[in-house]
Image (cartoon, grey):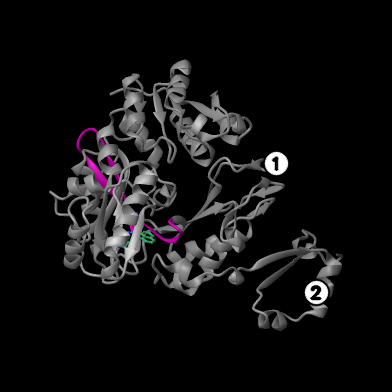
């Protein structure tokens, strides 16, 4: 059992702030590392100590192992929290941290290594009773063998890079005659992107839902699951809306998937917080996909429905404590939805947007949580991930959580960059989402920019002109959804008789 007194956060933005908050609560001192571009960022101002680790590009700052560990030594930090992204799933990093006598708040390099490669992950879990999509056992490089295996698997199938992640290096094949060509393409793509040409084949699961299970494991052999998160609302493998629990699961399936996730964690001697990803098909069969060996962006929805602070548990586990509750203690309370607020132009293919936040005012109120890393006056640059914040709502039912999300979106003011708030409004209003009957094809099937409600803030005289000159029916005939917001409507005096 060791006592962690000072944590260095090897990350930036909202997740750095999120980790600092829990450290504060636990009476643990914090060190922020930052790039030259982040000197005035909120997470830097919030930390007890700061160390500049280099210029703006991550490759010269947040990703340089020696600089991060150097900062920890210099400030006497006894633990490093990697957050997500950056070095969080780099086994060399966690190894170097532990070798320096610093606690890595996360799993052992062994577990990161196994789960970092899809083929070795499948091999590790194969000795346990875990459902996987039928496919090749190992890597495929020989065209003859590929054709034989493809005949066994059947069409359509999918070729995946073993080292890939987040959808990179995947190719769907719908015609057996194309197997040879697609295999060659997949191998060369994998080689180019990951420096590892290992690829494998699986049956293609049609209209899948992406459901993941949160697990926690301690150094005493205890492993629990904290139910699932539904992450099917994605755009090009980037999650946009997540929720917990999933509208698809019942208690029986939840229990089965939870037990399976625990087995996956045990298969690699997992320690800490991790996430086991599954695909669920139209007949509600589930298949193990991969395991993420880090705290995930969408962890707050799990915190909302369980009341567990996952960062606190991570730190306590790193100190050698057992998990502070048992599986039986856990229950789901209500429903939680998260919208990732990215600085992106949803009307232009979700292109990243940059600029100064001339106005930034997040919503507040019961059942609303905003995990953000920006403030008014701050700049959104091209150097890092465009995620500004996560808007999370919690309510007694799924409907209540979604309705709260709509209210929260409407009360979230961001001026200076375009954001995915309007996409969130679209999704929350959509019948497919509201009914719970949707899959990973939601965005492609249902979303076009014309469906966004566009805010048109105008002056009173222009507003009056609009109302008199254009009927809303005319607008709808042109398929334009407009919500007209006048300065009058926004005025705090609007309900006064004398106004
Ligand atoms: C699949 C699949 C269908 N069948 N595997 C995409 C990300 C990577 N982690 C796995 N992915 C998929 N694997 C089989 N055998 C469909 C996807 C997939 C997907 C998965 C989760 C969320 C969104 C997705 C979007 C397209 C494809």
* Closer to us: 261 or 480: 480
- Please identify the quadrant where the C terminus is shown: bottom right
Q: Is residue 223 magenta?
A: yes
Residue bearing the label numbered 1:
377
Question: Which one is earlier in the sequence, the residue at label 2 or at label 1?
Answer: 1
Tell me the residue at 20%/63% (across/down).
Answer: 147
Kindly tell me whether mark 1's CB lies below 8 Å from ligand 1: no
Residue segment shown in magenta: 211-237
Residue bearing the label numbered 2:
466
Residue extending farthest left? 127
Q: Position of residue 144 (x, y in %)?
A: 18, 59
- Looking at the image, residue 416 sits to the left or right of residue 306; the answer is right
Q: Position of residue 207 (x, y in %)?
A: 35, 69
The rendered magenta stretch, by its main secondary structure, is classed as strand
- Please identify the quadrant where the N terminus is shown: top left
Please indicate, yes or no, whether residue 331 appears anywhere in the rendered image: no
Q: Is residue 299 above or below residue 61?
A: below
């Amino acid at each position: 059992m060791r006592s962690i007194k000072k944590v260095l956060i090897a990350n930036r933005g909202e997740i750095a702030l999120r980790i600092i908050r829990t450290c504060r609560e636990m009476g643990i001192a914090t060190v922020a590392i930052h790039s030259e571009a982040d000197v005035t960022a909120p997470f830097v101002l919030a930390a007890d100590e700061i160390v500049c680790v280099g210029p703006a590009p991550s490759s010269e700052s947040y990703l340089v192992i020696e600089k991060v560990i150097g900062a920890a030594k210099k400030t006497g930090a006894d633990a490093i929290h990697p957050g997500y992204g950056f070095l969080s799933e780099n086994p060399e990093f966690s190894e170097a941290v532990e070798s320096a006598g610093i606690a890595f708040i996360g799993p052992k390099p062994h577990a990161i290594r196994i789960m970092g490669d899809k083929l070795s992950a499948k091999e590790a879990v194969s000795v346990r009773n875990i459902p996987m999509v039928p496919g090749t056992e190992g890597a495929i490089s020989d065209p003859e063998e590929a054709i034989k295996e493809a005949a066994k698997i059947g069409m359509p199938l999918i070729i995946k890079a073993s080292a890939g992640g987040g959808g990179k290096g995947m190719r769907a094949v719908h015609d057996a005659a194309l197997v040879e060509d697609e295999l060659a393409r997949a191998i060369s793509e994998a080689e180019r992107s990951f420096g590892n040409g290992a690829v494998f084949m699986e049956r293609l699961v049609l209209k899948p839902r992406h459901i993941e299970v949160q697990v926690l494991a301690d150094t005493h052999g205890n492993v629990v699951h904290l139910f699932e998160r539904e992450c099917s609302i994605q755009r090009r493998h980037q999650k946009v809306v997540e929720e917990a629990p999933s509208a698809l699961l019942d208690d029986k399936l939840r229990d089965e998937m939870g037990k399976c996730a625990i087995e996956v964690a045990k298969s690699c001697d997992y320690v800490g917080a991790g996430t086991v990803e599954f695909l669920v098909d139209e007949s509600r069969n589930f298949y193990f996909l991969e395991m993420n060996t880090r705290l995930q962006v969408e962890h707050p929805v799990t915190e909302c429905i369980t009341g567990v602070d996952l960062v606190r548990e991570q730190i306590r586990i790193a100190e050698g404590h057992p998990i502070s509750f048992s599986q039986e203690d856990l229950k789901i309370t209500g429903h939680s939805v998260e919208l990732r607020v990215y600085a992106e132009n949803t009307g232009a293919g979700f292109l990243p947007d940059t600029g100064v936040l001339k106005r930034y005012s997040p919503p507040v109120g019961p059942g609303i949580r905003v995990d953000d890393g920006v403030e008014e006056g701050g700049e959104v640059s091209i150097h890092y991930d465009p995620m500004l914040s996560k808007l999370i709502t919690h309510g007694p039912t799924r409907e209540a959580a979604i309705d709260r999300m709509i209210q929260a979106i409407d009360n979230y003011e961001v001026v200076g960059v375009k954001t995915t708030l309007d996409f969130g409004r679209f999704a929350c209003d959509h019948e497919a989402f509201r009914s719970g009957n949707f899959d990973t094809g939601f965005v492609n099937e249902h979303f076009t920019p014309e469906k966004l409600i566009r805010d048109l803030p105008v002056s009173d005289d222009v507003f009056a002109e609009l109302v008199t000159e254009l009927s809303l029916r005319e607008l709808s005939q042109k398929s334009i959804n407009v919500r007209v917001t006048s300065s009058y409507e926004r005025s705090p005096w609007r309900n006064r008789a004398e106004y």
